[in-house]
Image: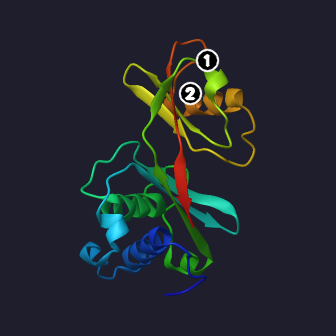
Amino acid sequence: MSGKEPKSEHARLARKVVESYVRGEEMPDLGEAPDELKGKKAGVFVCLRERGELRGCIGTIEPVRENVAAEIAANAVSSAMSDPRFPPVSPSELDGLTYSVDVLGEPEDIPDMSMLDPRMYGVIVRSGSRSGLLLPDLEGVDTAKDQVRIARMKAGIGHDEPVRLQRFKVTRHE
């Protein structure tokens, strides 16, 4: 492996999967992942950064795979190859990437924005079949109003449409 070794098992798995996929190598055996990644189900976001700038971030609000290891693997590949904001990661970029994995806590309904703190909670906005999510503690997102506005925009929900709000905490692994 190349570059700086991530501290957490979560981020190490994301890195191993991305590097294997981008290089066209055999994918890691998820059966060999640490028990802490195999014994739990949760929504997971995998974010890639290059020189501190976002390079890809894809995730699942709720678990859709058998465990956290499988969520990390699938979302790591999607972050590297399928984030519509960026071209696919090339082998020459692998050395410069850093990884973070956010494991989402259970979303809880909230009546309004007053119960949000963008440093502590992520937000999900829902209107009909559309939903948008914004992770907590993002640079430049300092108010609940900013957080909800960006999540609405991501979901294609107008500023005057009624929404259901949910908040959640994450455990961030780097």
Task: Of the two numbered discs 2 and 1 on the same chain, state the one appearing first in sequence.
Answer: 2
Front position in the image: 120 or 2: 120
**Rendered location of residue 170, percent (x, y):** 53, 49
Q: Which residue is disc 1 drawn over?
A: 159
Q: Which residue is mark 2?
A: 152
Q: Position of residue 18 (x, y in %)?
A: 43, 72
Q: Residue at x 39, y 48 (%)?
A: 43
Residue 55 is situated, as x and y percent measured from the top left of the image, at 59, 60
Left or right: 122 as drawn, with respect to 106: right
The 10 Å Cα crowd at callout 2, few under 14, some 14 to 19, many 20 or more, is: many
Query: What amino acid does circle 1 point to?
Result: His
Rendered location of residue 20, percent (x, y):
38, 79
| Viewer-closest of 155 and 30 | 30
Query: How far is disc 2 from disc 1 in space, using C-alphas?
Result: 7 Å
Residue under the point 56% across and 27% down: 152
Q: Residue furthest bottom?
A: 1
Q: Look at the numbered discs 2 and 1 and tell me whether their residues touch, using CB distance below 8 Å.
A: yes
Quarter containing the C terminus:
bottom right
Q: What secondary structure is found at the residue carrying circle 1?
A: loop
In this picture, residue 62 sits left or right of residue 101: left
